[in-house]
Image (tube, helix red, strand yellow):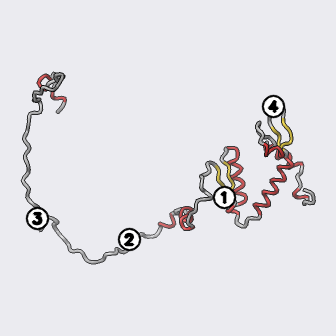
Amino acid sequence: MSGALDVLQMKEEDVLKFLAAGTHLGGTNLDFQMEQYIYKRKSDGIYIINLKRTWEKLLLAARAIVAIENPADVSVISSRNTGQRAVLKFAAATGATPIAGRFTPGTFTNQIEKEEQAAAEKAVTKEEFQGEWTAPAPEFTAAQPEVADWSEGVQVPSVPIQQFPTEDWSAQPATEDWSAAPTAQATEWVGTTTEWS
């Protein structure tokens, strides 16, 4: 980064902050695309990230973010627990939109009507309901006749009530096609009938 302002140069204080935060520590797996950002590998297999390259990429990201007119159009996302606090702090400081936790697929690609989105974001406040509530005017305003007794003037057809014969269900018909006799007849019941009533 030759020719850059002194303000944008990495200082010892910045390096100490990186080291305190553990920004320089990578994982044990190395992807071929990350090789250019690795400084060394420790004896325990942990890769150490090059802080100079990290600083350059941070400046590039800062320039891209500053170029966006509306800070709310910048989304800061972290689904990992270790990054969620940083996301919330960055969003609070810059006015960006934080997404900490689970990222909902389709958040950026699904089309939402502007009115629906505004209605979803609008919070219902108590001030909206402090006035006296009045019912909307009914669409049908013709006077309805008063009826004192609704059964008056209504004819109910008289249908004879059908009587079903009462049968003794305990008596079972004799059938020849049953292979075994019933296990219990109603007359053989030994329990008390007061339990059932």
Give the secondary structure at mark 2.
loop
Q: Is residue 24 above or below residue 110?
A: above
Give the mark nearest the N terminus, 4 or 2: 4
Give the mark nearest the N terminus, 4 or 1: 4
Distance from the alpha carbon under mark 4 to that under mark 2 = 74 Å
Q: In the picture provided, is 191 more to the left or to the right than 44? A: left
Q: In the picture provided, is 135 more to the left or to the right than 164? A: right
Distance from the alpha carbon under mark 1 to that under mark 2 = 40 Å
Q: Residue at x 88, y 52 (%)?
A: 10
Q: Residue at x 15, y 26 (%)?
A: 177
Nearest to viewer (mark 4 / mark 2): 4
Give the mark nearest the N terminus, 1 or 2: 1
Nearest to viewer (mark 2 / mark 3): 3
Residue 155 is marked as: 3
Identified by mark 3, the residue type is Gln
Judging by the rendered image, the residue that carries numbered circle 2 is 135
